[in-house]
Image (cartoon, rainbow, N blue to C red):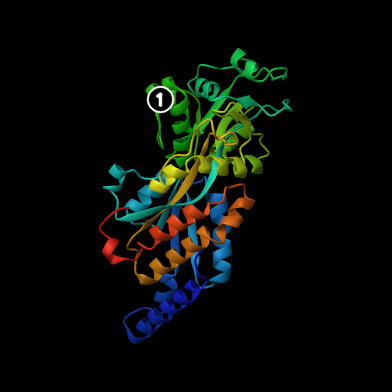
Amino acid sequence: MFRASKSLVIATVFMVALVAVSCNSGQKSGAVQESSQIIGAGSTFIYPAMTRWIEGFQSSHPGVKINYQSIGSGGGIQQLKKELVDFGASDAALDDQQLKDMPAVVQLPESAGPVCVTYNLPDLKTPLKLSGDTLSAIYLGKIKSWQDPQIMKENPGVAIPNHEIVVAHRSDGSGTTNIFTTYLSKVSPEWDKRVGKGISVNWPTGLGGKGSEGVSGIVKQTPGGIGYVELTYAKQNNLPVALVRNRAGSWIEPNAASTTAAIDAFRDELSKDVRAAIVDPPETAKDAYPVAGLTYLIIPKQGKGPVKTQVVKSFVEYIVAQGQDEAEKLSYAKLPPTLQQQDQALLAQVGNKASAASHP
């Protein structure tokens, strides 16, 4: 866990900056206030939790203002690449090749959550069951009706309405898309060959919506609609979520507990690289939801001055420690202690000039 004394460090840095400004008549008196304005951008997946984290942090740090722009993981990465923001958030960690085109950064997981399959079938009272094979066939445009035999077989005895399926997907660069398509690529060789995985793909069918807000909006307004969003967006829009079959053959509800089970299933992989995917856990993970992912904060190793760098570090420490309980209230999964410790080691590189020229 991180020490509460970091607040004292921030206050001390602020005071040093204030003295420096006072001694330099050529600088504006608002320089210190300006330096405490922090801007982040990226993931819509994490936006509900990010809003809660910002409120909690600012309440105990009245001199700090944090503005987070929910523009999608791809947008956040581009903003960070152009050095227009102080931190980014993405549900898709940057790989080694992508890191070559970025300023020196650290990437650390700050929460995890399920990517839910939500749908609009108003007359259906029983939670829908959808396997990976069925989901890939729907998103390939091969299954077009909710009464398709493959869907009916997975939902025996359920009176599914006779609606045409209307597929909704993200139109912007999205880490949520990366999690969802990574899962489809693992369970469907045809999907992997024809479409593949990533924050943006060439969708074979469907309507595009900007952000998780856009996808949930399409589904809510369209009888027969289906989409993939973070759980909070489904709850906020009163949309049902499907049970998805995992490798153990269990039909799993997307929630914090089933996401934690997915994290636990990949404990060894994550200990070696925090960027490891946690989709489609092995058969031994009987309670794990198969379409889950970690979401990451991407932080420049050398920020825009010592004050901003310290504020960003303190905010991230708050997220990784106290913020986990707040995230759990919004149906995200808490980071296990091992990942929190890895985050602490990664965060130590921020502001450390010795590590500025290299990537983790």
Residue 54, position as x, y percentages in the image: 54, 61
Q: State the image coordinates of residue 287 (x, y, percent, origin top left).
A: 60, 36
Q: Position of residue 239 (x, y in %)?
A: 66, 36
Say what secondary structure mark 1 lies in. Answer: helix
Horizontal and vertical percent position of residue 148: 61, 14
Residue 215, visible in the rendered structure: yes
Looking at the image, residue 286 lies above or below residue 63:
above
**With respect to residue 21, does 36 lie above or below?**
above
Q: Tell how many labels.
A: 1
Label 1 sits on residue: 192
Q: Residue at x 47, y 41 (%)?
A: 266
The answer to whether residue 11 is above or below residue 50 is below
Q: Residue at x 47, y 72 (%)?
A: 6
Residue at position x 47%, y 31% in the image: 183
Left or right, 38 with respect to 219, comes to left
**Relative to 316, is 194 above or below?**
above
